[in-house]
Image (tube, rainbow, N blue to C red):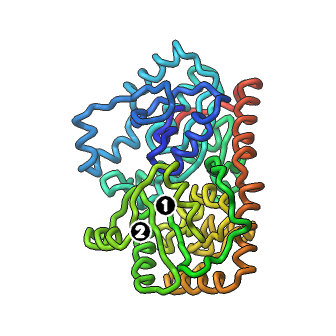
Amino acid sequence: MVSSVVPALDRGGGCLALHRHFCERSDFEVAVASELARGSTCPVRIELDTNRLVGRMRRYSRLLGNLKYVLPRPGVQRAVSRFAESWKPDLIFSVADDTHSLTGLHLARQRGVPFVVYFQDLFAFSTFIPTTQRPYAWVGRRLVQRYRHLQRVSDAVFHTCSGMRDWFGEEAKGEILYAVGGEASQRPECEGGQSPAGRKVRLVYAGNCYGAYGRMILELARALEGNPTLDLQIYAMGNDWPAKDVEYFARRGVYLGYLPFGQLQERLWGADAFLITMGFEERDRTFVQTSFPTKWCDYAPLGRPIFVWAPGYSSSARFARETSGGVLVAEPSADKLVEAIGQVFGNPERVGELGRAARGLADHELNRHRLHGVLKNRLRSLCQGGVGPRGGES
């Protein structure tokens, strides 16, 4: 695996999904080669060191950060090739990114083994990365060309959702591979979801709290101040809120920070409903069309109503409409979301219906065993059948 997205437990949903595929199971023997290999849960790690001084400077210089996306990296390529000489991989796998994927493609072609790319996010369109690492417009155009090149020349392709596949248009190939969820605990379930009796409804949000997403969640937290029927609990790896807001909502028991998944799952069991958000801002349009929140996969098995606060063109809105697995609120107003939650929990039959719909997602579209089978079977068939079309760098 040559990628900046590696199997890990504490680096976000994409890394967690890879951990569930490649480290929780014994279907593959995996080595990770990455500048971010340290901290990966994969036991075989090759840390691709860059010049430490330059690395520190890139954190503060957008120009240096952008040069990393476009300049050749012969030292990194040599390090990966030397390791591969002794390890002899049967296949090279990369989550499409802006720094490692071409290294993985070159290594696969060098060794005559299949190259597989997984499009989890189109990072060139992300507004969540630090400004110093955000691509200039001309660099972004080159990265987009690179994504399309990887799509064309890879021996197998996975897309994180239908919106990602559609972005590639007529040249799209490969399979939809939603992020895989964790194993649900064995605790007894509430059948189909229940309306809470004699207490407030607990709405849990576990996800991104930066950029447009962070602004939405902060607006919701403020809108629920003093609400007599609804409590909000926020779990996030970080945020870009004003410090006074973080302090205030942490003190109020609303903002609860980061928890490892095992501990988070215990909190999720105490929820009455879950929230998924995607930003309404126009500059995030492509990103929300092609990204897919991994929390869908962790919420669904718990059988609680799922509320999707997202624009109608987003991948989550599309998924909610196609599966009837969640309540879509396609308006940016936090008050509209609160109103929709109140309407659902004022109708116990609707609560039960939505809880069963969520369980249906876990049993079918988001079934973790089915999703892993899609990945496992495709990779095994590639190794048995050899490589496909050849292609160079871009």
Amino acid type at mark 1: Gly
Q: Residue at x 58, y 61 (%)?
A: 269
Q: Is residue 171 above or below residue 255?
A: above
Q: With 100 as the anchor, is 273 left or right in this view?
A: right
Q: Is residue 139 above or below residue 353?
A: above
Give residue 207's position: percent from left, percent from top.
Answer: 49, 60
Name the secondary structure under disc 1.
loop
Amino acid type at mark 2: Gly
In the picture of the structure, the residue carrying the numbered disc 2 is 214
Circle 1/circle 2 CB separation < 8 Å: no
Give residue 187's position: percent from left, percent from top.
Answer: 65, 54
**CA separation, marks 1 and 2?**
9 Å
Give residue 74's position: percent from left, percent from top.
Answer: 39, 26
Crowd class of label 2 (few under 14; some 14 to 19; many from 20; radius 10 Å) = many
In the picture of the structure, the residue carrying the numbered disc 1 is 207
Q: With 387 as the anchor, is 391 left or right in this view?
A: left
Ranked by sequence position, the earlier of labels 1 and 2 is: 1
Mark 1 or mark 2: which is in front?
1
Q: Which mark is residue 260?
A: none
Q: Is residue 153 above or below residue 354?
A: above
Give residue 67's position: percent from left, percent from top.
Answer: 34, 43
